[in-house]
């Protein structure tokens, strides 16, 4: 596909944020990861359309950019829920009951790992050690870290969020 | 509990850290002698002097390998024939399973890292710095960005810092999540916006790193030490350690202990003393073994409790001090499950560059899963032994990730063979059942791939 045929689909805000990164980089493609994260922060994920638009803006091929995007665990190339649940499955959290907690969350939300709830509220993902092993077991819901999730009724974490909406 | 701050001369790294983990802002930092090293060093002491102090101090890198920092820095060309940027990079990727020490320093005292980085950059005459921080450390990244802005306002960062003629710009780069980014040459590729595959060495980053320019990558804890050493001297730092190593070390314990946590102690503190700070084992649990310094170190056992936690002593005992954060294996946890969890982690996080790691680690994980699920045979133990011999040998793989994965596996089989035998002979293990009554094991990899791969691919 010729680049002129691609319809740019980045917002002015996204472009401004990406250009701010480019301003202190030696060449545009150097900010590939920042750009992917910026677009994801506005849209929740990186669609094929967005990917092509970013690649065009950074003067690189979409294939190369996709190779980068899919390398990193926290760049989402599929739509995710409003909040992403990152449940730590590394060794200390595993010792402290990860498998049971995973089952409880699955049952409560009706989804397995890698899936999004039908109401699009949550995507449930495993994550490697969150660097909070002294508070294990832990998970992140959106931007927030929840510690010792075995001690509290963890469905409360989701319920209180649902009530807030 | 006490709200008193630690003694700055014996616990320099945590002198500003309070129990409630409240972040130290510019005012609080400066009130406790913060940026004094900056004032007394820039333009007042030569970079060569500073480098000599770091060399004499015997500081060793706190990121895991323990390489002498002064020696590493001495390879950076100081009279560069081709003028251009030099880079200082802080490795704040902290993704080694069981490691939670850098988060503490970053969240509680961001200015300490920044002062350490300014003095380091001055010593190396680096003009641009990056803090490469893992994606999930959102609070730390935000605090660092605020602290950097405060430093600009005070003239501690930017052009002509404190009138010394020295310029230093510092940027925070948040990663997008991949353990291999912590390997320093992979980190450099990632900073360049690429996939994080490690680079071949030589050339070493000190000579040709970020964008082909001289680059030093150091761990958060390493860099936090620098300005204290320059301010108080090499001898002071040497005296802080108990044995042959110098300084203090952040030690941590997680697992079934009463008070999991992290403490700054003299390097070389006996392991038993660290366990005592953690309040010993939880009631009803007994200590069977522990990984001394994160997920890629070899098991040690209760008979090693009186060893000093320093690089050489732990090395002689057949393991590595690594990051200094220990993970405890208790008597209600099966070593097969413990090791399988780690090997699955390394298999998932393999960057895919070389065959023994990309194809070997998933194979090891599969064999371990077969054994755990009761499908294993004694031939599987031979297969694991062959894999350990091949993947674990330094030099067969492009970087240290794959050999690191073999450390808990090899030592786990060595010390806890009875757990493997139980699975092989009985096909069922009460300890594993306890962990996962329904016996459902989702592959870690599968869950992750759910969204990081595109729909079409
Ligand atoms: C797979 C792998 C992951 C690593 N992860 C980290 C990390 O998260 N943080 C870190 O400081 N060092 C990590 N290292 C070590 C770095 O490569 C490098 O040695 C270190 O950052 C140097 O800093 P230091 O000399 O101050 O210890 C890792 C090494 C490997 C092989
Ligand atoms: S050992 Fe693993 S992580 Fe390291 S380069 Fe090879 S494939 Fe990549
Ligand atoms: S193992 Fe879960 S936070 Fe470290």
Image: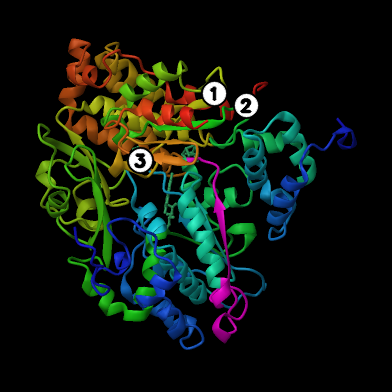
Instruction: Report crowding for label 2: few under 14, some 14 to 19, many 20 or more residues within 10 A (C-alpha).
Output: some
Find the magenta span and give its range. B152-178
Q: Nearer the viewer, residue A71 or B215?
A: A71
Residues tagged 2 and 1 counted as in contact (Cβ below 8 A): yes
Residue at the image position 43 percent from the left and 25 percent from the top: B444
Distance (Cα) linking label 2 and label 1? 8 Å
Q: Nearer the viewer, residue B174 or B388?
A: B174
Q: Does the residue tagged 3 have its C-beta within 8 Å of any atom of ligand 3?
A: yes
- Say above or below: B126 vs B253: below
The percent coordinates of residue B141 (x first, y second) are 50, 54
Q: Nearer the viewer, residue A10 or B63?
A: A10
Q: Which chain contains the residue that carries disc 3?
A: B
Q: Which residue is mark 3?
A: B97
Residue at the image position 30 percent from the left and 18 percent from the top: B380
Residues tagged 3 and 2 counted as in contact (Cβ below 8 A): no
Instruction: Report crowding for label 3: few under 14, some 14 to 19, many 20 or more residues within 10 A (C-alpha).
Output: many
Q: Which residue is mark 2?
A: A78
Residue A138 sits in quarter: top left
Q: Is residue B382 left or right of residue B425?
A: right
Q: Earlier in the sequence, mark 3 or mark 1?
A: 3
- Say above or below: B38 vs B23: below
Instruction: Report crowding for label 1: few under 14, some 14 to 19, many 20 or more residues within 10 A (C-alpha).
Output: many
Q: Which residue is mark 1?
A: B450
The percent coordinates of residue B374 (x first, y second) are 27, 12
Question: Both on one chain, marks 3 and 2?
Answer: no
The percent coordinates of residue B416 (x first, y second) are 17, 29
The percent coordinates of residue B29 (x first, y second) are 39, 71
Residue B154 located within the stretch drawn in magenta: yes
Number of numbered labels in the structure image: 3
Viewer-nearest of discs 3 and 1: 1
């Amino acid at each position: 596909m010729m680049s002129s045929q691609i319809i740019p689909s980045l917002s002015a805000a996204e472009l401004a944020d990406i250009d701010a990164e480019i301003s202190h980089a030696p060449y545009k493609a150097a900010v590939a990861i920042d750009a992917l994260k910026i677009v994801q922060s506005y849209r929740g994920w990186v669609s094929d359309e967005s990917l092509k638009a970013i690649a065009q803006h950074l003067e690189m091929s979409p294939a190369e950019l996709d190779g980068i995007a899919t390398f990193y665990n926290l760049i989402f190339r599929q739509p995710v829920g409003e909040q992403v649940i990152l449940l730590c499955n590394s060794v200390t959290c595993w010792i402290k009951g990860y498998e049971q907690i995973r089952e409880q969350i699955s049952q409560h939300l009706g989804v397995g790992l890698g899936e999004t709830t039908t109401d699009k509220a949550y995507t449930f993902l495993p994550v490697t050690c969150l660097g909070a092993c002294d508070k294990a077991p832990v998970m992140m819901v959106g931007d927030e870290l929840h510690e010792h999730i075995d001690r509290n009724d963890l469905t409360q974490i989701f319920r209180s969020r649902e009530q807030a909406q | 509990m006490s709200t008193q701050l630690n003694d700055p001369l014996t616990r320099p790294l945590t002198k500003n850290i309070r129990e409630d983990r409240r972040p130290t802002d510019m005012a609080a930092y400066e009130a406790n002698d913060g940026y004094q090293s900056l004032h007394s060093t820039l333009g007042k002491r030569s970079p060569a002097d500073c480098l000599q102090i770091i060399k004499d101090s015997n500081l060793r890198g706190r990121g895991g390998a323990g390489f002498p920092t002064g020696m590493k820095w001495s390879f950076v060309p100081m009279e560069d024939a081709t003028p251009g940027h030099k880079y200082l990079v802080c490795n704040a990727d902290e993704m080694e399973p069981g490691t939670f020490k850098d988060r503490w320093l970053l969240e509680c005292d961001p200015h300490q890292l920044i002062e350490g980085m300014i003095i380091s950059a001055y010593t190396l005459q680096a003009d641009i710095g990056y803090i490469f921080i893992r994606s999930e450390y959102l609070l730390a990244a935000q605090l660092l960005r605020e602290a950097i802005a405060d430093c600009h306002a005070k003239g501690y960062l930017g052009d002509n810092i404190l009138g010394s003629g020295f310029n230093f710009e510092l940027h925070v780069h948040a990663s997008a999540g991949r353990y291999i980014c912590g390997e320093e040459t992979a980190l450099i590729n990632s900073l360049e916006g690429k996939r994080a595959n490690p680079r071949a060495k030589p050339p070493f980053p000190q000579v040709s790193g970020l964008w082909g320019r001289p680059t030093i990558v150091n761990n958060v804890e390493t860099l936090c030490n620098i300005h204290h050493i320059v301010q108080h001297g090499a001898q002071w730092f040497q005296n802080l350690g108990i044995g042959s190593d110098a300084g203090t070390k952040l030690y941590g314990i997680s697992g079934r202990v009463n008070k999991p946590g992290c403490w700054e102690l003299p390097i070389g503190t006996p392991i038993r003393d660290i366990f005592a700070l953690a309040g010993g084992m939880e009631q009803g649990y007994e200590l069977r073994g522990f990984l001394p310094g994160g997920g890629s170190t070899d098991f040690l056992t209760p008979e090693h409790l009186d060893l000093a936690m320093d690089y050489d002593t732990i090395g002689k005992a057949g393991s590595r001090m690594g990051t200094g954060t220990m993970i405890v294996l208790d008597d209600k946890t099966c070593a097969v499950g413990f090791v399988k969890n780690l090997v699955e982690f390394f298999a998932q996080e393999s960057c895919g560059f070389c065959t023994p790691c990309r194809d070997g680690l998933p194979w090891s994980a599969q064999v371990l899963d077969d054994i755990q699920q009761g499908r294993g045979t004694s031939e599987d133990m031979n297969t694991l032994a062959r894999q350990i011999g091949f993947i674990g040998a330094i030099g067969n793989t492009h970087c240290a990730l794959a050999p690191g994965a073999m450390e808990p596996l090899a030592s786990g089989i060595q010390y806890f063979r009875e757990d493997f035998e139980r699975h092989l002979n009985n096909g069922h293990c009460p300890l594993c059942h306890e962990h996962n009554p329904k016996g459902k094991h989702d592959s870690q990899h599968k869950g992750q791939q759910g969204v990081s791969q595109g729909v079409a691919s």
